[in-house]
Image (cartoon, grey):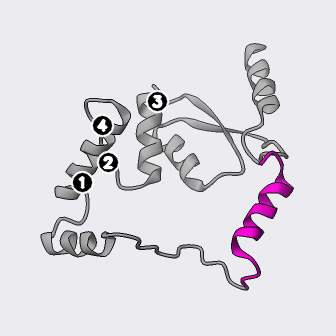
Amino acid sequence: MSNYSEVIGFVKNQFDNKAFIPLHEPRFLGNEKKYIVDTIDSTFVSSVGAYVDKFELMMSSISGTNKSVAVVNGTSALQVALRLAGVCNGDEVITQGLTFIATVNAIIYNGATPIFIDVDIDTMGLSPSAVDGILLDFLCI
C-alpha cells in the first residue's frame, strides 16, 4: 500500500459495511482465557510470574539474544528503547507530529525534547524529505 487511498480502501474492505468498527475487540483463538484465569489465580498479574518468564524466554529465543525484558506497555518499551539508544537529558529527538502521545511521552521521560516534523502524504509515515530538511538545518547551526 503506497498511498492513503489504498490504505483507506484496504480498511473499508476488511470491515465491509459495518456501521460500527470496534476499537478494541478481544479475540480469543486459543488458550488465552485459560491463561488469564491462571494468572489471576496466581495473584501475579503485573510484572512477574510464570507467563512473564515464559514470554521473556520465548522472545530471547525468537530474537537470538541472551536476555529479553517484558515491560508494561508501549510507552515503557519506547522509553527503554530510547534510553538504550543513548537518548538522555538535553537531547533532541526527531519524531512526527502524527503519532500517539506515547511517542512524545517516552522522549520527554528521558529528559529529551521532541522535534516534530511532517509526515509523508502517501505513507502517513515519517517524511524522509522532512528528515533531510531538519538535519540540514542542524548542520548549519
Q: In front: 113, or 127?
A: 127
Q: Magenta residues, as a range?
A: 1-18
| Location of residue 14 in the rendering, given as x and y in whole percent from the top left corner | 70, 69
**Which residue is the extreme one toward the top?**
140
Residue under label 4, please give it.
61
Q: Amino acid at mark 2?
A: Ala
* Residue 70 - label: 2
Q: In front: 123, or 110?
A: 123
Q: Nearer the viewer, mark 3 or mark 1?
A: 1
Near mark 4 (Cα within 10 A), the count class, few <14, some 14-19 or many ≥20, is few
Near mark 3 (Cα within 10 A), the count class, few <14, some 14-19 or many ≥20, is some
Q: The residue tagged with tag 1: helix, strand or loop?
A: helix
Q: Earlier in the sequence, mark 3 or mark 1?
A: 1
Q: Earlier in the sequence, mark 2 or mark 3?
A: 2
Q: Amino acid at mark 1?
A: Val
Q: The residue tagged with tag 2: helix, strand or loop?
A: loop
Q: Amino acid at mark 3?
A: Cys
- Does the CB distance between marks 1 and 2 fall below 8 Å? yes
| Location of residue 50 in the rendering, given as x and y in whole percent from the top left corner | 17, 57
| Location of residue 139 in the rendering, given as x and y in whole percent from the top left corner | 74, 14
- Does the CB distance between marks 3 and 1 fall below 8 Å? no
Q: The residue tagged with tag 4: helix, strand or loop?
A: helix
The main secondary structure of the magenta stretch is helix
Alpha carbon distance from label 3 to label 4: 30 Å
**Residue 21 lies in the magenta stretch:** no
